Image (tube, grey):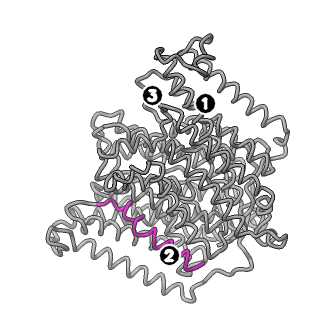
Amino acid sequence: MSDQTSAVPAVSGGLRSAALPGLFLGTLAAVAAALVWITFSRQIPVTGWMQTILAPDLDNTAEVIAHYSYLPRISVALLAGAGLAFAGAVLQHVLRNPIAEPATLGIAGGAQLALTIATLWAPWLFAFGREWVALTGAALAFTCVLSISMSRGLSPVSVALAGLIVSLYTGMAGAVVTLFNHDLLIGLFLWGAGYLDQTDWSKTLYLLWTVPPLAFTALLLVRPATLLSLGDSTAKSLGVPVGLIRFLVLGLAVALTAVIVATVGVISFVGLAAPAAVRMLGVRRLFPQLLLAPVLGALILLITDQLILLLPVTYRAFPTGAMTAILGAPMLLALLPRLRAAEPPRQQAARTPYRARRPAVILGLLTAALCLMLALSLTSAGSNAGLLFGHMDEVAAFRLPRALAALSGGMSLALAGVILQRMTANPLASPEVLGISSGAILGVIAVMILMVAPNRLDQIAGGMAGALAVLLVIVLLTRRQAFSGTRLLLAGIAMGSVTGLVMAVLKTFQDPRLGQLLTWVSGSVYGTSLNEALMGLALALAALALLPLISRWLTLMPLGTSLPRSVGVQTGRANLLLLLIVAVLSASATLTIGPLSFIGIMAPHFARYMGLVRSGEQAIGATLAGGLVLLTADWIGRTVIFPYQVPAGLLTAMLGGPVLLYLIRKRS
């Protein structure tokens, strides 16, 4: 795995005019000012604004509400949006990764998991303040990331990879608790969705005393941080203490994000969209990016919140933090065609990855382990007295469909993950990042809401329609640039943010259908029919059979775009075919076992750490490992705490996450 990744791509020469960023930000500022004027004038006449702002009449209810609720809400939106955008710009530059954002380091996930645990089992901790509980969780998550990546000098790839896995792990752990305690966590869901409702100026003052000082301190490190974009070796040759500078800058970005998350909850998309949009507008130098990205982030969050206030009162339950996707996703998708196609990061020539001497032996052991696990899954079940063998009459009706569904889902996601990581030359890529799983989720949610009593076939049809719709959007956005990896990842994240909005809103409602939806989203194979499982397994095996035809492409694509073209590979067609294979595999797995993404990230790394380096052997090894991990998780989830069950997707993350983190640290 390379430590020398390319810098975050900029924009083409046609967008380097200095007037474009100013015009774009000026337009958004005018829109924000107009919305503030409209919403404020609805509450207080224009002639009473000055008195309301400076000295409200305490006997006038409208002035009190405007002064202590509306105005602090504007201030919090500006400060939180600016802080998250600043942190996102810093993280994307230091990690040299265009999809890096504050959530990459697990800060939001750690804070929310800590609040969940404290709410259920240690409510006395809130006597010290909810902010301190959230900050503690965020700090522990970041400490875990640092402990894993410290041995590699906090290299961009190791930090980003460890952060993403920690984030997924904390999210999955919180989802397990949510499944069994949903009704007790409604208040936490309201906080986590990012509501900006205020009752006084305390949060504004808290953010005012923390966000600007942290951002100003980070600005003092701009000069050495700029040199990090030249690569670790070059920066060290110029006398820059790379590890120290990266530690300080990352620490400031994490502290900034933790403060905001602990104060107003999880605000989605701002930390990713604002810095990316600023670069797409032609701002290439770091210092202007750090100045303009916070302005754009503040405007995005403020406009989103003001639009919510324009809705009728009965519809204001939509959380601002999640609703940022409504404004940010279209903006990012509109600017995406302006992004200059960039060469994927090249593999580091000086470091030879560990390669197994006898990969066939490793593949044979994986196959044997998979067969043994399949036999154990079919012949055993859980009971109140412990593990129970026999009862073979249950195999065809219950155990076989679940086992095959878990097996096919793990194989499909693992193979899709290998293809996507090699195609984009990004070790953080996964099927969920592509957006296919997100489209399938939205399709199934639409069917469950719009139909009175949808059956399994209706859900499958809705999920497939949603997946194909997302695929069509991504193809239209990236086909002119030969489906470059950066465009695919940004387009997938933009589409996936819409799913985050829908799920955040649904969690705050008391809909009885939410339990079924949460179970499916968590990756449960319960209720899968034998025909569905066999269909998924057939698709996984068919994709695996295509491996001899595409292995050459998978070998060449991580080396850049020029080399494959020089040897006769038509990169546009190759990327399109690989994209279609990934889409089919992701949609099939999503419809069978839910929108799992952790296997897609985890299995390719498992194969690589076992020494399966060549494209063909890595794909086969990852496919076997993915099927084995998910099959094992399903068996454990339905036997260990019988009669309760833990969905296979959640248990996969809980079991596989620490193992993968250990392997990353060991190989470092």
Q: Secondary structure at mark 2?
A: helix
Q: Position of residue 312 (x, y in %)?
A: 45, 21
Residue 475 visible at all:
no
Q: Earlier in the sequence, mark 2 or mark 1?
A: 1
Mark 1 neighbour class, 10 Å CA radius: few under 14, some 14 to 19, many 20 or more: many
Q: Is residue 163 above or below residue 149?
A: above
The residues bearing labels 1 and 3 have C-alpha atoms spaced at a distance of 15 Å
Q: Position of residue 242 (x, y in %)?
A: 74, 69
Mark 2 neighbour class, 10 Å CA radius: few under 14, some 14 to 19, many 20 or more: few
Q: Quadrant of the N terminus?
A: bottom right
User: Dot 2 corresponds to which residue?
Assistant: 662
- State the extent of the magenta-drawn residues as a range: 646-668
Q: Position of residue 221 (x, y in %)?
A: 76, 57
Rendered residue at 74%/62% (across/down): 6
Q: Majority secondary structure of the magenta segment?
A: helix
Q: Quadrant of the C terminus?
A: bottom right
Residue 658 inside the magenta-drawn segment: yes
Q: Position of residue 12 (x, y in %)?
A: 81, 47
The residues bearing labels 2 and 3 have C-alpha atoms spaced at a distance of 44 Å
Amino acid identity at mark 1: Ile
Amino acid identity at mark 3: Arg
Q: Earlier in the sequence, mark 2 or mark 3?
A: 3
The residues bearing labels 2 and 1 have C-alpha atoms spaced at a distance of 43 Å
User: Dot 1 corresponds to which residue?
Assistant: 303
Q: Secondary structure at mark 3?
A: loop
Residue 403 figure quarter: bottom left
Task: Please give the label number shown on residue 316.
Answer: 3
